Amino acid sequence: MSGVPLTHIIIVSSLLFFIGAYGFLTRRNLIAMLMSVELMLNSVNINFIAFNKYLFPDNLDGLVYTIFIIAIAAAEAAVAIAIIINLFRNTRSIDAEDADQLKN
Amino acid sequence: MLNEFLILMKQELLLCIILFITLILKISDNENSPRNWAGIVNSLLLINFLAGFILPTTGELFNGMYKVTELMIFEKNMLNLGLLVVSLMAHPCIKTHKHLPEFYMLIISTLIGMFFMISSGNLLLFYVGLELSTIPMAALANFNLNKSSSSEAGMKMILSSAFSSALLLMGVSFIYGTTGSFSFVQITSQLDNNALQVFAFVLLFTGFAFKLSVVPFHFWTADVYEGAPVPVAAYLSVVSKAAVAFVFITVLYKVFGTMANIWYVLLFLTSVLTIGIGNIFAVRQENIKRFLAFSSIAQVGFILVGISSGTQAGEASMIYFLLIYLFSNLGAFGVVNVVSSMSGKENISDYKGFYKTNPALSWFLTISLFSLAGVPPTAGFFGKLFLLTSGASTGNYLLVGYAAINMIVSMYYYLRIVKAIFMDENAMPIANIKAGIIPGIAIAICVIGILVTGFAGGVYNYIYSLSSGI
């Protein structure tokens, strides 16, 4: 374990996080927005694993947290996709711009 | 050990049992002879609420990951009461619904999540509880499967909550990186307020701000309240918000107590924005559900003023205010729900001449609105008084004065509805509504609560004795 320093991994995960945030704020396709959020959650996972491996290698807290995040993100994606499918049945579109009934 | 586990976690375990009972009832249901679902579940929830007062034991489990204090038992009893009132309120529109058991399963699982979140002494349990309380909420917002506005509300809720939990998790990951632990006690002892920890705290604060619908993270609130079924909007605005506020104050005071000067600035800025924008937008709403959404945003701003003091009075006044807010907002939503489910009308202009046809409901709605506005004889006045007094203890009279002026602005839009009900002429007022006995009980509980919590001084003293400052 000499090659990659911790800062490089943090840079990658921060980039991934901001790419995800940018995608969430600019994409108008609901599935793409969901994918962007997943990207953000994955960047958090990279962070946890890197911190655990490099800074606190004697316990497994970070890894356990990562497993929980993956499981909960899967549950979240399942509910979100179910809602998006239901929205598609009602409006025939998965574009966020078309879901504009609730505006004032 | 097992006994300790059963007794300490009894409130969560009881809710889990009710969840499984609804599941079994659902599986064994016979399409041809539908049961009296609502009656069974309501009586179970009533038992659950009463059982919350039995055996109030305090202690810790799993190395401090899960802990119970007297204050937490009180908070959980409050949330149980909120769920019971929402369930009674939902009775007319839900009793014949095909998916009634699913409604209760989802709503009870959100409450279990909130309980674990309140009792958490560790960021892992906190995160799991938070997600358990928000993911089913999105499914509930989409409960009217055939209405596109309802699925739009669900979509907005799940996407914004996923985004906010991603921000919150990024904050958690940096806190882990700098302290090496998830336990609240160890994090507190490891904090040295370096730049990365401050950044992590701001991300964490943002995550909370989303769930509490603090401006500038409030965009989902009005849309979700308008699109979701009325009982779900009521539950979201009261129970869900109160649970997050309880954890928020624990995190601010107990975990990040050493960063008090940093979060004071954040609370100051967000409370000024929240009160102002909540009020400005509430003035121009025509739909009563959207109106209540913006009024609840403004109420959260007052809560932020109260907790910015960081004292024992700050925590006590927040919990006292949330208790009053539970009664007042559920009372208002209760009347709106009865009107909406019987006549389908949700605009403020539809309420013109409401007093002529429905004097009792008009009075209930008026008392609730007065309490939300903070007019003296009702409890809402005392709630806001204690919040602002606690906010004034830091010596920042600018903020308190601003909040007090905004209370007067808020009088305008609450009284606008009262004026529509009592004074405006309308050729076609809403016809006389038979609310039925069960939603009537829900509204009566709220009105009694509004009147009693204001005058019974013991309530505030009791909460004060349980609270603690930084």
Image: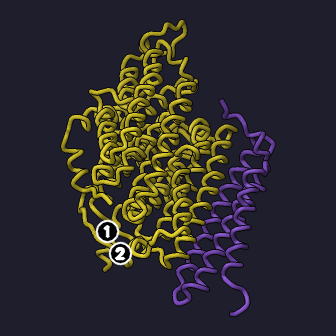
Chain colours: A purple, B yellow
Determine the secondary structure under disc 1: helix
Say if mark 1 contacts mark 2, CB within 8 Å: yes
What residue did someone put label 1 on? B8
Residue extending farthest to the bottom is: A1
Is residue B22 at least partly visible in the picture?
A: no
Location of residue B224 in the rendering, given as x and y in whole percent from the top left corner: 59, 41
Name the residue: 67% across, 78% down: A7
Name the residue: 35% across, 67% down: B9
Rendered-image quadrant of the N terminus of chain B: bottom left
Determine the secondary structure under disc 2: strand
What residue did someone put label 2 on? B61
Identify the amino acid type marked 1. Answer: Leu
Q: Is residue B49 above or below residue A97?
A: below
Chain letter belonging to callout 2 = B
Q: Is residue B338 above or below residue B118?
A: above
Q: How would you rate the neighbour count of disc 2 (Cα within 10 Å): few for under 14, some for 14-19, many for 20 or more?
A: some
Q: How would you rate the neighbour count of disc 1 (Cα within 10 Å): few for under 14, some for 14-19, many for 20 or more?
A: many
Name the residue: 33% across, 65% down: B10
Question: Of the residues under marks 1 and 2, which one precedes in the sequence?
Answer: 1
Rendered-image quadrant of the C terminus of chain B: bottom left
Location of residue A40 in the rendering, given as x and y in whole percent from the top left corner: 68, 64
Tell me the quarter of the picture where residue B136 sits.
bottom right
